[in-house]
Every structure is written in structure tokens, then in C-alpha cells.
Image (cartoon, coloured by chain):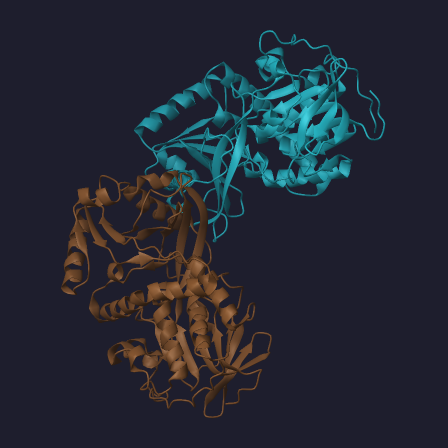
Chain colours: A cyan, B brown
Amino acid sequence: VSANPPTSDVVVVGGGIIGLASAWRARLRGLSVTVLERRAIGEECASAVAAGMLAPVAEAEFGDAGRRLLELGLRSARLWPDFAAELEQATGAEVGLRRNGTLLVARDADEARELERQLRFRQSLGLQVRRLAPSAARELEPALAPTVRLGLEAPEDHSVDPRRVLAALRHACELSGVRLRERAPVARVEVGAGPRVTGVVLADGSRVPAAHVVLAAGAWTAEIDGVPAHARVPVRPVKGQILRLRDPDGPGLLRRVLRFEGGYLVPRGDGRYVLGATVEERGFEPHATAGGVYELLRDARELIPGILELQLEELSVGFRPSTPDNLPAIGRGTPSGLLWAAGHHRNGILLAPLTAQLIAHALTAPDRIEDRRASLPAELEGACDPLRFATAGGLPTADPPGPPVGVHS
Amino acid sequence: VSANPPTSDVVVVGGGIIGLASAWRARLRGLSVTVLERRAIGEECASAVAAGMLAPVAEAEFGDAGRRLLELGLRSARLWPDFAAELEQATGAEVGLRRNGTLLVARDADEARELERQLRFRQSLGLQVRRLAPSAARELEPALAPTVRLGLEAPEDHSVDPRRVLAALRHACELSGVRLRERAPVARVEVGAGPRVTGVVLADGSRVPAAHVVLAAGAWTAEIDGVPAHARVPVRPVKGQILRLRDPDGPGLLRRVLRFEGGYLVPRGDGRYVLGATVEERGFEPHATAGGVYELLRDARELIPGILELQLEELSVGFRPSTPDNLPAIGRGTPSGLLWAAGHHRNGILLAPLTAQLIAHALTAPDRIEDRRASLPAELEGACDPLRFATAGGLPTADPPGPPVGVHS
């Protein structure tokens, strides 16, 4: 692969947190990296809408896929403190990592029974959780309604402010020499002899040559042409409506992330709160609805009556990039030189540091044997394999590795 | 008073519907008129937030003040069709006058008992109302919930689109030669020998000379200095939150204006709806709140479950200009040359044609005897008298009329 100036080692398609984190990590390993973002950074982007929970324990779900997602989440949650510190050191910006834990609460007897089941499930996995009687829950968070029936604390489930992370990543990318192009929508991946990717073609017809292309375009990933049908990751948008509130009296109403059947309330620590989120299969339908907003407020006020006093600053709609098994696609695809960092569903913020690390490794350690510490156990790697959706009759998933990429420091 | 070019016959302070309608009417009588608006037309202005109900019958209230407001409302409602037609003819714009009537509904037995009382009250005043059993109400408006307990139809209570009215009035003013100055906040009324007003002084210190000054600055009217304390109209802001919804399937959900305990839903006829409004004594606190939005949606969905499917397009906050008796201040004040068109509380859109007519008459028929047809009966005139709040020890309210204004056609 030539390393002529106009050809990047890597083109990352998508300037959300996944794309920027991957680009930054790849650049820190000496690769030349270009990020192509269809809009402006933060504009129409799930990262700018997300609440920012880093909550693998609270999110843990039954079943095989649930267990694998939990494993991925725990790994990435462990990376977050260093990732945040490094990002803050590189840019001088705060990213709003708050380590106050998460509280799951039940409003009635049915929800309490379910929460007990969730408690036993987490204990059986050795996860750090604590059962809280209503009085104990209200001692931790006095704003909780007296009707709360049961609480479950996940003291290691934290949160971060994704808008700050996005701004810091942008800055870190610029400082490290990543080339950032906004309003540069990608129409298709370009494939040459081999077959092997040779870059991408923008909507305006211009080419951006590259040795590797990382698809990190969130819910819009599936709109990028040029990938053989049998090797595509079926990413679809799952609409979420989310509210941003502000307490005119400043912080203090709620300290921990609060989770409940149908939603969550995330304090930012400065009197601002994020209340989310609906889960709607409506494609890219971009409007907030009376019903979505009503149900979020109704559920939250049942638990925290005081939220009715808060200012309603923003209604947003975001699109989660979801896959059929709700697990992400991270790593190499087909043809050679194509990588996926997509399909993170509800877990993009949590999984960003791990995804960026895996993508950087895949770009620089093509046979994956020289760098065992950073790679995943086979089972988890399979769970994230972009080719797991490959249809029968497609290419073999054991795609031969491409040539190593030249390192430019 | 000199009529030199830089001196207007009239300066109107405030570019809302009341101010613009008064300016337009005065200009059509040949006066030279300048309107001074502190922001842009339609920006931070109750007219641009209002739902636009023309509903004196639905709004009728017990008591003396209620009866007088009803009288004023009925008179202005009768002026609306011609006013709208004239405005549309002058500008070629539609103002969205919809003559589909209003439906008051009760959700439970208590509300139904109260609605029966309201029905008898209106019948005793000879107002046109019709009692509707739940089935009849749902026949008129099939989107009503089956739980509706009683309906009351006011077939002559209509609605208009205030944003269209505002835009049309602006255009009509410009076409007729009213001078319109935006971003021109008025600091104080200027008073000269007599005493008599000589114009206003803007926040930037510049003077705008005029023979007459009409205060029509809505909730901000009380912030204008220079009026003797004993002769001020005590206008205060009463905050309202209001939602704008849109049906992606177009019009059809609701045809009539719907009113219920705590709110109203006004169809615009094109799939858009206005859902209002909270009533809050919070001064100029400009934020939408979680509680305000929640309660509007909760009440409306109880009656029209289908609203939950609508898109939520806009949350707005407006400030009603309210007086201690909830009646407006229309006409001459003290000192000579000062007029008030303020304090319209919840009734500014309804009362705009009547207010404009009264102001134009007061400006051109100073002794009010020459033009009896347009003036109000003494009782109603007293109800709107800007000097009714004058404190003891102030000037006598029988202020001698100023000199007649020269007419420039």
C-alpha cells in the first residue's frame, strides 16, 4: 500500500465518539488517519444525544448475548478511568466522569419481585450489587418518593458526559494530527484488486484513498454502499427520545444515576439531568412526540416528584445503531482493509475505549498474535465479529489479513 | 403640538397584536404613526405564543368583572370577521380565522356538575350554548375519550392563528405607512409643559417625539418609566407554558376548539394543534418546566388519547399582561397625550379589534361625543379606564382632553 501524502493509512467514516476514539487511538500508534463526518461533529449523532451511563452491571441481561455484552461492558468500564484521564490530560478539558454509582429502583410489588430476581442474577455472576430496603434507598437519595418499594445499588456503575467527551475527542484528534473533515458524507467504500478496499467515495463524487476504512457511522452505517451484500452488518436505527432538565437551585436533587422500568435519570453534577429514553422501531423518524415526552415525565415523577420543578431545556431524538443480536460489530470485515466499529446499540459510550483499542490493534497488528494482551478471548471476539451476520454462500469469514500498514510517527 | 416631520402624531410602544392593530387603525384615520418594538416583531411577545381563542362565551365568568369582560369580549368577537377580512384584503395573507365553535368538556362527575352550573349561567345571560350528552359530544368529536362525562358547545366561539395575524398586521402597517422600528426599547415617556407627553426616550438615550404615546407593551408595559406613580396601570406578567403539536397524518383529529379544566386544545386546521396553558405567578421566569409540560400532556391525553401520537414541535413560554381586576386598560391616561392599550390578560387576541378601534377613536375624537357609535357604554368605559387604579391624592381622573391631532392623509 502506498503511503503517498493524499492516501491515509486509515479513513474512519463517522465522527461520533466511536469514530473519533478509534481515530485518536490509531493516530497515537503512528498511523495517518482521516475522519469523515457527514454533518458537523455532534450534529445528528447518537453520541451527542446519549446520557452517558457506564453501567454494565445495571444493564446486565439474561442469556448468552447478555453475558457476552456484560463481559465487554465490564472490560470497557475498567478502561474508562484511564481513557478519561488521558483525554483530559491531552486536551485540558473535563469530560464529566462521575463515580457515584447507580441505583435501580422498583415502584411496586411486581417491579420489586423482578428486582429481587435481578439481584440474585447479578450475585450469581459475582457482580458488585447491594440490596436496599426502601428506607435505605431513600437515605442514599432523599428525593426518592416514599412509594419506592426496593432499591439495588451498583456502586461501580458510573457515568460520563458524552457531549464533553465528544468535544474533548475532537480536540485530541486535532492535536494529535488526525485529519477531520466535516460535512463530508461518504457514499460508498471503494474496492480494488484483491479484493481490497482502496478508500471511499464521497457523495460529491470525490475520492478519499486509504489503505483501511473503518465504518463507524452509527445508525447510518448501513447506508454506505460498496460492501458486498453477504458481508454487511445489518445495522438499523432504534429511535430514542430523551429530555434534558436543569434544576434552577443547582445540584443536589439526585447524586446517583437512577434506573427504573422504562427509563433513567442521570445527574451531571451541576444541576443538569438527562431523562431517557424511549425505545422505538420507527426508522429515522426524527420527531419528538407528545407520547414519548409524556411517558418519560410520568415515570420519572413517580419516583422523583421533585423533577416537576426542573426546567425543561431540551428534547432530543437519537438513533441507536442496533444489530439483530444487540452486540456490536468490532474488527475486520470483508473485503480486506475494511473494518467495522458499529452496531453499539445502547452501549456506544460505555464500549468506546474498548472499541478504540480493538480497532487500533486490528489496524497495527494484523495477525493478532503479536499482541495477545489487548485482544479479546475467542468467545468475545466471535461475539463482536462483523462477519457473524455473513450469509451462507458468501466469502469465508477467515479472510486473509491484509499487508501491514506503514507507521508514520 | 407641531407636526414637523420628525414628530409623529402617535408613537405606539409595543409591536404585538394590540400595538400593531392600534397603529394600523390610527394610520387608516390619517395619523402619522411610529411603532417602537423592543425586540423583533414576534420575538418574546405574548401574541406570538397565544393560542388565539376568540371565545367570550366559553370564557364567561361569574361576578361583575366577569360580566364586563364578557360584554367586551362579545363586542370584539363581533368585530373579528370584518377585521380579519379587511386585514386579509389589505395584505393578501390568510389569518387562519376558523369558525368551528368550541366544545367544553367534563372528565368526571365533579367537573360535570360544574359544567351544568356553567351551562345554566350562560343560559341565564342569553348566550348561545348547547348541552351535549357524552354520546353527542363524541359524535361531534370522535377523538374524545369514552370517559367524557358531559359536553357544552359554544358554536360562536371561534379561533384565529395569532402568528398569522401578527405577520399580516406587520405587513398592513408597512403598506399603510406606519413607521416600524424594531430593537428599539423604550426607557421612558417624556413629559413636557401642561403636563403633556412630548414623546418617548429610548434605552440608548435618543428621543422619539410624538403628540401622543400609546403604551401597548404587554407584560413589559410596567417597566416603562416616566408615568407618575399615581397614574400607572399595575400590569404584571402571568407566565404561561404552551405546546405546539403536529399530526403527521394531517388534520382530522379534532375540529373544534376543546376546553377543559386546566387547559385547551386549539386545532389550526392543517394538522397542527396548540395545547395550553399553565397559569403561573412567577414574574418573568422564562423557562419551560417538566411539571408544566407534564400536566398539559396528562390532562389533554385524558380527553384526547390520540394526542400522544402527535409530534411535539415547540414548547413556548409567554407572559400575559395582567391587571388586578383582569380587565384591560384601554384609552386615555395621565398626563395628557398618554394612552394605554395594555393589561389584556388572557384576552389580547380576542380584544384586539375593539382595542384598536377604541384607541383610534380616542386619538381622533378627543371629546368622545362626536363619535358615539364607536364608544362604549359608560359602565364598560369605566371598566377599561386606565385611571381606575389611580391612587388617592393623585391627579383628578377627569383629565382635560389634549388638543386635537392634525390629520395627515
Q: Position of residue B84 (x, y in %)?
A: 38, 63
Picture residue at 36% right of the left edge, 72% below the top: B355
Residue A381 in view, yes or no: no
A40 relative position to B168: left or right: right
Q: Is residue A385 above or below residue B35?
A: above
- Number of labels in the image equals 0
A390 relative position to B363: left or right: right
Q: Nearer the viewer, residue A149 or A390?
A: A390
Q: Position of residue B237 (x, y in %)?
A: 40, 65
Q: Position of residue B1 (x, y in %)?
A: 50, 90
Q: Quadrant of residue B17?
A: bottom left
Q: Quadrant of residue B334?
A: bottom left
A178 relative position to B332: left or right: right
B14 relative position to B347: left or right: right
Q: Quadrant of residue A94?
A: top right
Residue B395 in view, yes or no: yes
Q: Nearer the viewer, residue A183 or B76?
A: B76
Q: Is residue A70 above or below residue B137?
A: above
Q: Position of residue A44 (x, y in %)?
A: 58, 38
Q: Is residue A387 above or below residue A145?
A: above
Picture residue at 21% right of the left edge, 68% below the top: B63
Q: Is residue B188 above or below residue B125?
A: below
